[in-house]
Image (cartoon, helix red, strand yellow):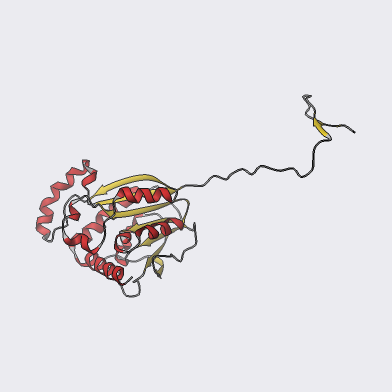
Amino acid sequence: MVHHHRALRHWDRWLTHHFVGQYLLRAEQSLLTTLLKQHYGKHALLIGMPCQASLLQATHIPCHALINPLSHTLKASTTTPLRWERVIDSDLHELPIQTGSVDLVLLAHTQEFIENPHQLLMEACRVVKPEGLIAIIGFNPFSLWNLRKFSEMGRFISAYKIKYWLKLADFELEQKKTILFRPPIRQESLYQKLACLEKIACLPGLGGVYILLARAKVVPLTPIRMQWKQPLTSMTISTSMTGHVAHHSK
């Protein structure tokens, strides 16, 4: 647990103070705005960092909540106003949220900085309402983002594995998008000069970040076969068109 707390703190500092971190947040918010424009509801939950508040501003959902194990020690970015209904400081192994109570869950990279990402994803799926959505944002391990030491503070998980876990949780994938084809280099001037690399979006497998949007399936009810307790040996069904029941005495 100490290790993933340290990783989450490093991740929060990078998002807050590095220019690529700010660019990442803006790009993710822009794409989420497009993906979620037709999704409505009342409650949205972000499993992430306070500085990622802008991601939920991409939705029409009015009530926002944040879950983070470090919320009491972290401050949101001054450039992003918070609109949280509540902030929940909680461990990520068991979310203190009622099953099937949230219209939208946003899991934004947090799964990459903890010891058991599969368990966190299952917990995130558990709290989604039937027909509700989960949006998962992750780094592509096959992109240029995995060529530098940035990846050492977290463990990149492929979109293929995330899709497999979603299938196990009875979620249906609706959309997959990739963004950010430039590597996260330190020099801002050089980073801007490499903007031409964003034009290779026709090769989605090279994108640095993926967003998966999946919907919770509604499990159909299984019909229960009725069992008559009273024997019907004394009753026969008439074959007449009127459909009346004829009784015969023994």
51 left or right of 134?
Answer: left
Viewer-proximal residue among 120 and 62: 120
Residue 98: percent from left, percent from top = 49, 62
Q: How many marks?
A: 0
Q: In the displayed structure, would residue 55 be above or below residue 206?
A: below
Q: In the displayed structure, would residue 222 be above or below residue 244?
A: below
Quarter the N terminus occupies: bottom left
- Residue farthest top in this picture: 240
Quarter the C terminus occupies: top right
Residue 115: percent from left, percent from top = 33, 64
- Residue farthest right in this picture: 250
Residue visible at 36% across and 53% down in the picture = 135
Q: Quadrant of residue 23?
A: bottom left
Viewer-proximal residue among 59 and 130: 130
43 left or right of 53?
Answer: right
Viewer-proximal residue among 69 and 51: 69
Q: Quadrant of residue 24?
A: bottom left
Residue visible at 30% across and 62% down in the picture = 52
Residue 187: percent from left, percent from top = 10, 60
198 left or right of 159?
Answer: left
- Residue farthest bottom in this picture: 73
Q: In the displayed structure, would residue 37 be above or below residue 71?
A: above
Query: Can residue 78 be seen in the rendering of this structure?
Result: no
Query: Can residue 12 be seen in the rendering of this structure?
Result: yes
Residue 87: percent from left, percent from top = 40, 69
Viewer-proximal residue among 166 and 106: 166
